[in-house]
Amino acid sequence: MEKQVMVKNIDQVARQRNFLLLLVIVSVFSVAALSLKLITTEAKVILAPGLNQEVWTSDKGVSISYLEETSAMYLPLLLDLTSDSIDWKKELLMNHVSQSDAKYMRLINEYFAASKEKYKRFSLSTHFAVKSFEVNQKELTVKAIGQLNSRFGERGLQNIPAVYGLSFEWRSGKLLLKEFVKLSKEAEELYDHEQN
């Protein structure tokens, strides 16, 4: 009888050992699979500096505040210029220009090339002070209204009201700049009409 109990206990301990061994093997494979998944997963965390308000994104687009904050980051790269800073600001911005159509890159390149020549010739430096944004969330366009302050070397200072239009493209989880234009009164009305 004692022998049967001992055999039964040994059998029970062997089953428990086999169960624990199986659990360990499953755990090792699970940890290995999770480690492989973490190693191969590419996650991008985008933190925009100085956010003043909550922003959100989805598969279909972005919030109005996201458009405003992005415009507030791009405008200094486009308008707060000196002849020495143009190349550096162009290089920073070009990584954020849409490549879905070659004309977007070409237009931004032409803008910086023309600016570089003009800024050197007149010893020009500019700063754009934003007063407000008008955002069309559906079309991903922003109209920046403000004051363009220009300094011509040591000779003169000019402050004029100005309106600039920016249009964006939401592609692969990124908000990319498509176009940047200075809007005259007529162009502003046309721009508004095209966006509506």
Image (cartoon, grey):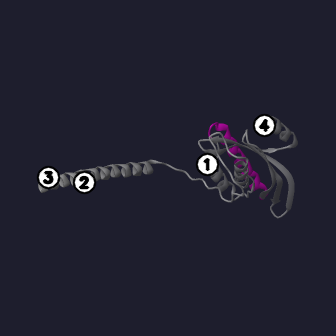
Give the x, y percent position of residue 108: 69, 45
Q: Any mark on residue 17, and which? A: 2
Is label 3 in a helix, a strand or a loop?
A: helix
Residue, disc 4: 195
Report the Cα–Cα distance between label 4 and label 1. Answer: 26 Å
Residue 4, numbered circle: 3
Image-quadrant location for residue 174: top right
Q: Quadrant of the N terminus?
A: bottom left
Kind of residue indicated by mark 2? Arg
What is the secondary structure assignment of the residue under circle 2?
helix
Q: Are marks 4 and 1 in contact (CB under 8 Å)?
A: no
Magenta region:
99-123
Residue type, label 1: Asn
Marks 1/2: CA distance? 58 Å
- Work out how far the residue at label 3 is from the one at label 2, CA to CA, in angstroms: 20 Å
Front residue of 1 and 42: 1
